């Protein structure tokens, strides 16, 4: 919305008494969360930019840039909404103070007219015509009160005009602030579009150009080996979790995130190049910013970033049962932390690595071996397998 249209809308809304601010505490919590996430994403992006260049690293950088731009855009829009609400309140207060100043001017004008009509000579004649001393005293008291009322009215008018000037100054500052936020909003939206475009170009090259595709496959294989090594190393001397009979959990596990499975368990074969990529888990397409939850109580073995997988969490549930959650935009847990079933481990981003819908990668392991999670998760039409 342009500043002109925005000003018109705000002016129209200011005619009525604005409602009391609703949900300001929630808005502040949302703002604080955005600030924290922006800080984390900036640190991540800085770390990625220091790494050796590669297709996966470039794609990961584009993804983080998109998430960072999206959150900065959200923050600007939240600031704009809050300033717009403040502007409406200031407009109402300015309107009320203008009315108070107008009424003060009217009162002062009436008193001045009354004093003018009496005149000094008329006052003296009026007082001298009074024979009764009591009447004379009352007349003098009335004239003193009239003069005092005039002085009070002048002081009230001065204060009212000062309040009006302060409100007018605030209104000008708020309009300027809204204009600046609109420019920031345009800039952040452009940054977001540029990051998503770069990600789409990289993905298109990986999918359509054999040389680029083979390079990406090699990097993805190395990344998968790195994750596998971390899983093995992280679980060698563990488990603090009590042993459990995991066989009874088959078909009973809650889903880590609400959504639909878009990539099933098992190796993926490229339809054009015939290359095979290991895929020991499932990809679940989720709504932006969906919470990622622990399917069982467990201990966080690691919560860190891996090339090609993004922010990744490994939970040990005891009894040889492990779960892996990858592509989280935000992490809510730390290594060594014990979590309960359904605790939030993190949240997915606003976009997927390719700039499309966000996905969460989920893996389930028994005795170190990856198994198809679909056999262990609760059956639900909401999570049907696609493709």
Image (spheres, grey):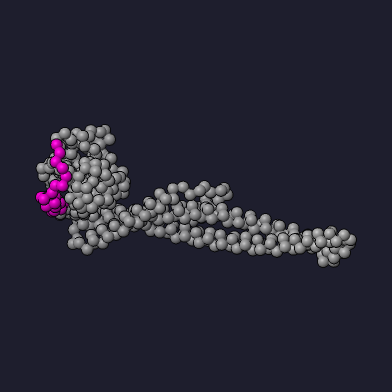
The answer to which quarter of the image holds residue 116 is bottom right
Question: In the image, what residue occupies the spot 71% across and 57% down?
Answer: 107
Whether residue 268 is visible here, answered yes or no, is: no
Task: Report the predominant secondary structure element of the magenta stretch.
Answer: helix
Q: From this viewpoint, is residue 242 visible?
A: yes
Q: Is residue 234 magenta?
A: yes
* Residue pictured at 27% horizontal, 48% vertical: 346
Image coords of residue 70 (percent x, y): 34, 53
Choose between 241 and 42: the one closer to the eye. 241
Residue 37 is a magenta residue:
no
| Image side of residue 367 versus residue 163, left or right | left
Quarter of the image for residue 115 reads bottom right
Say which of 277 and 337 sits in front.
337
Provide residue 270's location: percent of width, then percent of height.
16, 45
Q: Residue at x 82, y 66 (%)?
A: 120
Image quadrant holding the C terminus, namely top left
In the rendered structure, the answer to whether residue 85 lies left or right of residue 134 reads left
* Left or right for 104, reference 82: right
Q: Which residues are magenta?
A: 220-245
Left or right position of 79 against 170: left
Q: Nearer the viewer, residue 318 or 321?
A: 318
Measured from the top left, where is residue 185 in percent x and y? Answer: 40, 56
Identify the residue shown where x is 44% and y is 55%: 80
Along the viewing direction, whichever of 208 and 251 lies nearer the viewer: 251
């Amino acid at each position: 919305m342009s500043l002109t249209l925005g000003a018109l809308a705000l002016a129209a809304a200011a005619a009525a008494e604005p409602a009391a601010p609703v949900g300001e505490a929630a808005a502040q919590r949302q703002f604080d969360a955005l600030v924290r996430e922006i800080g984390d994403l900036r640190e991540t992006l800085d770390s990625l930019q220091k790494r050796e260049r590669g297709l996966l690293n470039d794609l990961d950088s584009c993804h983080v840039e998109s998430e960072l731009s999206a959150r900065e855009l959200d923050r600007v829009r939240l600031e704009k909404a809050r300033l717009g609400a403040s502007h409406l309140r200031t407009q109402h207060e300015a309107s009320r103070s203008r009315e108070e100043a107008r009424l003060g001017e009217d009162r002062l004008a009436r008193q001045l007219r009354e004093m003018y009509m009496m005149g000094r000579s008329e006052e003296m004649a009026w007082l001298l015509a009074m024979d009764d001393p009591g009447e004379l005293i009352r007349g003098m008291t009335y004239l003193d009160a009239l003069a005092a009322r005039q002085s009070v009215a002048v002081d009230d008018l001065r204060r009212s005009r000062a309040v009006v000037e302060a409100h007018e100054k605030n209104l000008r500052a708020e309009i300027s602030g809204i204009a600046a936020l609109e420019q920031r909003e345009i800039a952040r939206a452009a940054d977001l579009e540029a990051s998503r475009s770069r990600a789409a170009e990289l993905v298109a090259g990986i999918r359509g150009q054999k040389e680029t595709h083979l390079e990406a496959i090699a990097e993805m294989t190395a990344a998968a080996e790195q994750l596998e090594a971390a899983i093995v190393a992280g679980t060698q001397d563990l488990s603090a979790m009590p042993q459990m009979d995991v066989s009874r959990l088959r078909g009973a596990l809650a889903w880590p995130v609400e959504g639909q499975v878009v990539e099933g368990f098992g190796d993926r074969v490229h339809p054009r190049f015939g290359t095979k990529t290991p895929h020991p888990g499932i990809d679940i397409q989720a709504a932006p910013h969906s919470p990622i939850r622990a399917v069982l109580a467990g201990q966080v073995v690691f919560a860190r970033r891996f090339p090609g997988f993004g922010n990744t969490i490994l939970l040990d549930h005891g009894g040889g049962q492990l779960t892996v959650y990858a592509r989280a935009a935000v992490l809510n847990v730390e290594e060594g932390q014990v979590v309960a079933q359904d605790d939030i481990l993190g949240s997915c981003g606003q976009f997927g690595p390719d700039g499309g819908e966000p996905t969460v990668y989920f893996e389930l392991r028994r005795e170190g071996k990856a198994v198809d999670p679909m056999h262990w998760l609760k059956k639900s039409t909401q999570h049907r397998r696609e493709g």
